Structures are given as structure tokens and as C-alpha cells.
Amino acid sequence: MRSLPPSDVSPRHAVVCGSSLAGLLTAGLLARHFERVTLVERDALLDSSHVRKGVPQGTQTHVLLKRGLDIAAAIFPGLLDDLQAAGTQVTDMSADCAWHVAGVWRKRIHSGVSLYSQTRPLFEWRVRSMLAALPNVRILDRHEVTGFLYDVAGTRVTGLRVRVPGCLEETRLEAELVVDAGGRGSRTPQWLEEAGFPRVEETRFQIDVGYATRLYRKPAGFDAGWKSMIISAELPRLRRFGCLFPVEGDRWAVTLSGWLKDYPPSDEDGFLAYARSLAQPHLYEAMKNAEPLGPIPTYRFSHSQWRHYERLPRVPEGLVVVGDAFCSFNPVYGQGITTSALLVEQLGESLRSGLGGLSRRYFEQAGRLLKSPWAMSTTEDLRLPELDETRPLGSSFLYWYGERFQRLTATDDEAVRTFMEVMHMLKPPEAIFSPRLFWKTLAGQPTPSKLPRGPEPLSARLPRAA
């Protein structure tokens, strides 16, 4: 990454609020541009892959799409090798994954799109370790942010007030740039309004998604011809989703999810019954023959939200917002971490023009960037007739075309590769409407006799846990 050109403010110190993945990536990026970077985190950060209180969804399966992984690896050279050494499983998202969608099994080919699969605590730990090794980075854990510091005119954020939880004494952290990576619970909108700035508009999209994840010991000698499995929902009729991914320690992470408060249960029998109700039984058959490890933590996600900082008529200089503190949407689609990484990358691009006017420049660009992942998520959710929202113009055609395109991926290599590239944000969504694919989708629907067979049932072949 290029160094900063001269600006009206010297890039001496930057402060990042929150050690989410968005915060860790931001701090790593800023370490290339500032003399010093301080990361402030309320939780105690241990040198291990522990689940943090501040990340209640940390026990659930997380997917880092290829675009996000590329950004993370650019910020932290050597990260991919480090992850593999720690036990991360690397698979081809198409060749190694049995994926049922739109009533068909997607064709499995070598797509060239690699998926790095591990638990979220492991990924955070390895990124955090690489960040902590940077000589100009200070990690200040066990401290909470209580508000912003401003200049005399009240037009620039000049730092933070922080304190140890439970204590009244505050410490002032002066900085040329403050980045809020504090997640959905961010208090930045309230603090700005209290300082006289306009209210931040917010769009909310109620979906009431719930999900539950359990770790299993992979059965000895397991070889069903696939390493991961996804059984997609088929909205609006089938509203339950399930996936299995290999993670470190020779384990599987199995996640079940449902829309509109159709939450998966956290008890043994209920969890298995929910898996059995999916569009295909294969995930259930794999789970019931594997050794469960620990409890079944659940997480509920009531609504997608977008805080429209890009619409503010006035923004203070010296402040930007990244990650879920800016925008967060349905986690089932796996876009969250990668979208956060894209915002961090955009911050780096905005920094190239210096600190002068950075906040406005960044928010305008970030607002444009967020339109695509937000539209992809919300448009799919709007298949549910219960959602009292206005459907985008042409959505009926998009649903019809999208289902036919997914069925085309059962037999067509180009369709599979393009879908993987769009899903992993390597290509824009418009790629599935290229002239060749558009014609294939309209005219080339596979007949039932040409559809690929799914994986063989596992019940008779898998060894049972002792």
C-alpha cells in the first residue's frame, strides 16, 4: 500500500474502537499510514482462540469470502500460511462442497475459489496476533469508550475518552483519526447528535433470523466424496437452512438456521429433528453418526440495519465508521466479514488523498459500496410474503431468473464458476446476466434425466460414535 501524501494534519496517531474483525483489519491498515495506532477493546484479549463476550455470535459458523480473505492477506502478509499452520481447512468452494439449491444439486467442478474454513475465534486470534506483533500498534484491552473529544470549534473529532469498566476516572486519547468498529451496538449516532450534528438516518429490515451451531468430531475414516455441505432454503416455501464446514481439530461445524422466528432449538433431539426437516436428509445423516462436542449455542438476529452516514449533511472531520457499526445484514448469506473488509479497503483508498476531507470522502464512497451487498441480501429476503416492505421494481423477474440460473448450475460449468465468483464478491452481481449466461438460463434448463445425482445416503456407511 502506498504511503500518505502530505495533508493539513500530520498522521501521527489513530485510534480504533473495537477489536472485531473490522477493527483488527482497520488497525492493521492504519499501521501503514500512522506513526502510532491504538486499538481499544472492552473485553480482555487473551493470547488464545477464546470466544469473547463482546462477540455473542462468535460460536457460530462464519464464512470469509475470497474477496475478504484477499484483503485480509494483503493487510497481513503471511496470514494464509499462519492460518493453515493453526489448523484451518482449505477447500474448493465448488469441487469439495455438496450444495443443494433450488431443488437441484449444484455441479461440482474445480472453480479456483478457495475457502479457508475455521472457527471465528481462531481466525480472530491469528489476525490479532499478527496485529500485536506490529511495533507501532498498542492494544488497550479492558477499556471502554465513553465519548469523543472535539476541537474548540466542535467540527473535528480529536480523540476518545476511555475508562476501565466500573471506574469513574477517564483517560483522554488524543488522535488525528478515530475509527468506530464497535459493531451494531455502536453509540456514535447518539454521541454525534449530542454534539449538535444531524441525526443519522437508519434503515431497518426485520427478518427475525435465528441460528444454532454445534461442533462434531469428524468420524474416523469418513469419505463421502465431499468435505462440506450446504442445504439451502428455498424461499418462500422452505425457510430452513443448514451447512457443514470442516474446521480445525478434525471437527465439523454444523449450523442450522431459519427465518421469521423459525429458530432451530438448542436441545439434542430438537437440533437433529430440525436438520432432518431440511430440503435434503444428507446433513442430518452425517450429524447423527458423528460425535457431538459440547453444547448447542444459539444466536438471534432480529433485523438488518444500515446507518446512513453517507447521507449526513455535516460530518465531523477525523471520524470514520466501519463494519457492523455502519451496516449489517442477514448473516445467513455470509457477506458480513467480507463487506467489512471492503469498507476497510475503501478507507485505505480514501487515505491516499490525505486526512483533509477524509470523513466526507470515505462516507460517500462507502455508501456507494454498500448498495450491492445490501441489495443482494434484502432482495432475497423479500421472497417472504410476510415482510411488509416494498419490493424493488422488477423483483418478480429477478426471482424467476435467479431460480432458473441456480438450476442451470446443476449442469453448466460457466454458470457454476460465475456464481462462485459473484458469491465471493470477485465479480459484480450483474455477471450472471452476461449475454451467454442470460441465453443459457432462458433456453438451457436441464431436464430431470440430465440432472446430477446427489451424494449417496450415509446411514449405512458411516461408522457410529463409540
Image (tube, helix red, strand yellow):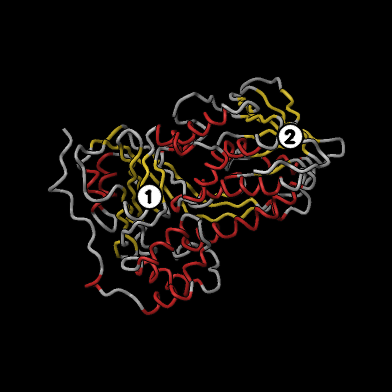
Observer-nearest of 45 and 127? 127
* Spot occupied by residue 354 in the image (x, y as percentages of width and height): 76, 44
In the rendered image, the residue lying farthest to the bottom is: 443
Lateral position of residue 273 relative to residue 463, left or right? right
Q: Residue at x 21, y 49 (%)?
A: 224
Secondary element at tag 1: strand
In the rendered image, the residue lying farthest to the right is: 153
Mark positioned earlier in the residue sequence (1 or 2): 2
Instruction: Report how far apart the C-alphas of labels 1 and 2 lie in the structure.
Output: 38 Å
Lateral position of residue 287 relative to residue 207, left or right? left
Q: Which residue is mark 2?
A: 148
Residue type beneath disc 1: Ser
Lateral position of residue 59 relative to residue 4, left or right? left
Residue type beneath disc 2: Phe
* Spot occupied by residue 191 in the image (x, y as percentages of width and height): 72, 39
Q: Residue 420 occupies which quadrant of the picture?
A: bottom left
Asked if labels 2 and 1 touch by Cβ distance under 8 angstroms, the answer is: no
Q: Which residue is mark 1?
A: 257
* Spot occupied by residue 180 in the image (x, y as percentages of width and height): 65, 39
Secondary element at tag 2: strand
Task: For label 1, count other residues whose C-alpha is less than 10 Å away and answer few (under 14), some (14-19) or many (20+).
Answer: many
Observer-nearest of 79 and 424? 79
